[in-house]
Image (spheres, rainbow, N blue to C red):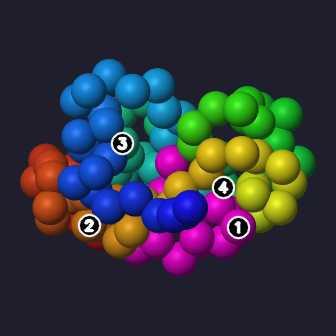
Amino acid sequence: MSFVITPKELKARIDKGDKLVLLDVREPWENQLAKLEGSVLIPLGTLPQSLSKLDKNAEIIAYCHHGMRSGDATGFLLQQGFSSVKNLIGGIDAWSVQIDGTVPRY
C-alpha cells in the first residue's frame, strides 16, 4: 500500500468528488500565505494533542510546504491507528507548480 499521492493524483480525486480530508500540518503563518481549499490546519507540533479532531476512518491527505513535515505526520497518524493516510509529494509547492499557479509559492 502506498502512503504517498502526487499532486496530479490528488487533483483527479478532488475533481471526481472523492471524500478526502486535506490536512495542512504547516504553521498558521504559512497557511495564511497559501492553502488548499477546504483543508484543516493542524500544525505538526500540535498533532499529538489534536487527534480527536480527525476521523480515524476518513481518508486523510497530509500536506506541508515540500512534503517533509507531512511525511512525518503521515507516519505518526498511521502509528496511531489511522487507516488511510497519504502524504502529498512535494507539498503545496508542487501543487502550485503542477496544478494551480494561483496558489502562491513562498
Image quadrant containing the C terminus: bottom left
Q: Earlier in the sequence, mark 1 or mark 4?
A: 4
Report the residue marked by disc 2: 94
Are the residues tagged 2 and 3 within 8 Å (C-beta)? Answer: no
Determine the secondary structure under disc 2. Answer: helix
User: Which labelled disc corresponds to residue 16?
Assistant: none
Location of mark 1 (residue) = 75
| Residue 36: mark | 3
Q: Residue at x 77, y 64 (%)?
A: 76
- Which class describes the residues within 10 Å of circle 4: few (<14), some (14-19), or many (20+)? many
Q: Residue at x 84, y 49 (%)?
A: 81
The segment highlighted magenta reads 61-75
Residue type, label 3: Leu
Amino acid beneath label 4 = Pro
Res. 88 image quadrant = bottom left
Q: State if disc 4 and disc 1 touch (CB < 8 Å).
A: no
Residue under pointer 4: 43
Instruction: Estimate how packed mark 1 is, as few (under 14), some (14 to 19) or many (20 or more) residues with alpha carbons within 10 Å.
Output: some
Where residue 77 sits: x, y (%)? Answer: 75, 55
Marks 2 and 4, how far apart at CA: 19 Å
Give above or below for 24 relative to 72. above
Tell me the residue at 61%/51% (across/down): 85
Residue type at mark 1? Answer: Gly
Residue 86 percent across, percent down from the top left: 53, 56
